[in-house]
Amino acid sequence: MSYEIVKFPDAAGNQIPGWLFRPKNGNGMGVCKIHDIFGLRADYENVVKPFVDHGYNVLVPDMFYDVEPIDIIDPDGNKRKSYRGQSSVERHLVILAAAVKKLKSMPETGGKVGVTGYCLGGTLCYIAAARMPEVDASAGYYATSAHDYVNEAKNIKRPLMMHIPETDRTHTPEDAKRVRDSLDPIALAKWFIYPGAVHGFANNDHSRFDPAATELSNNRTFELFDSVK
């Protein structure tokens, strides 16, 4: 699937690179898709494809364009490049704001932008719903540390959906419950648990990729985003 490498400025004028995917008909809501802690990589084309096929203009900003990765052995025994601890949530929010601004400025998006993301990106979706009124809707997948921000749930003013695997090794079941509990009183928020799914279930390159859970969660995200177009 083809994409365009674009650059867009943050508030300080730093040029941030990203991949911009366009739907066949050209026009469609903007979607900012935030990658996981392992960074922007070729495999993300597979993750983006359903969203482009649905008719969205998708921008994947490189959240770690200005830092060096470290080599780790993941839980599956594979050597991978990781950016864990190499940046900060506040810096990521600056990059996210710049990407959303870029999408909103594109005539073909109609000024509407949804944010979705995985792992790190899932956490940023939770925060964006509370802090970024310019984001029309957010859908987070297996957020790693949303539980650190549950005190911000009361500030959610835009629709938020959280896709939660039954098992997530990145935090405790108690932390996952805190996230769910924080969203229950919020009329604009929904959460879904995917039985048998684990952290990473919607990433095609994950050893426990779950096509059925991915399709279901994506369709729910499409329904959310389409409701605010």
Image (spheres, grey):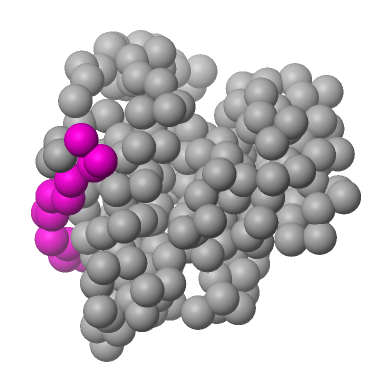
Question: Relative to residue 8, is residue 169 depicted above or below?
Answer: above
**Where is residue 61 shown, x and y percent of the image?**
28, 46
Residue 105 visible in the displayed image: yes
Q: Quadrant of residue 159?
A: bottom right
Going by the image, does 64 lie left or right of 130?
A: left
Going by the image, does 9 lie left or right of 169?
A: left
Instruction: Name the residue located 30 percent from the left edge and 51 percent from the top edge.
Output: 99
Looking at the rendering, the stretch of residues picked out in magenta corresponds to: 1-12
Instruction: Name the residue located 87 percent from the left edge and 50 percent from the top edge.
Output: 185
Instruction: Name the residue located 13 percent from the left edge and 50 percent from the top edge.
Output: 7
Residue 217 visible in the displayed image: no
Which residue is at the front of the view, 145 or 133?
A: 133
Q: Residue furthest front?
A: 12
How many numbered discs, if any? Answer: 0
* Magenta span contains residue 28: no
Instruction: Name the residue located 31 percent from the left edge and 57 percent from the top edge.
Output: 101
Question: Relative to residue 23, is residue 172 depicted above or below?
Answer: above
Q: Quadrant of residue 23?
A: bottom left
Which residue is at the front of the view, 13 or 81?
A: 13
**Where is residue 125 shown, x and y percent of the image?**
54, 46
Q: Quadrant of residue 188?
A: bottom right
**Where is residue 78 shown, x and y percent of the image?**
37, 20
Q: Quadrant of the N terminus?
A: bottom left
**Where is residue 171 shown, x and y percent of the image?**
68, 21
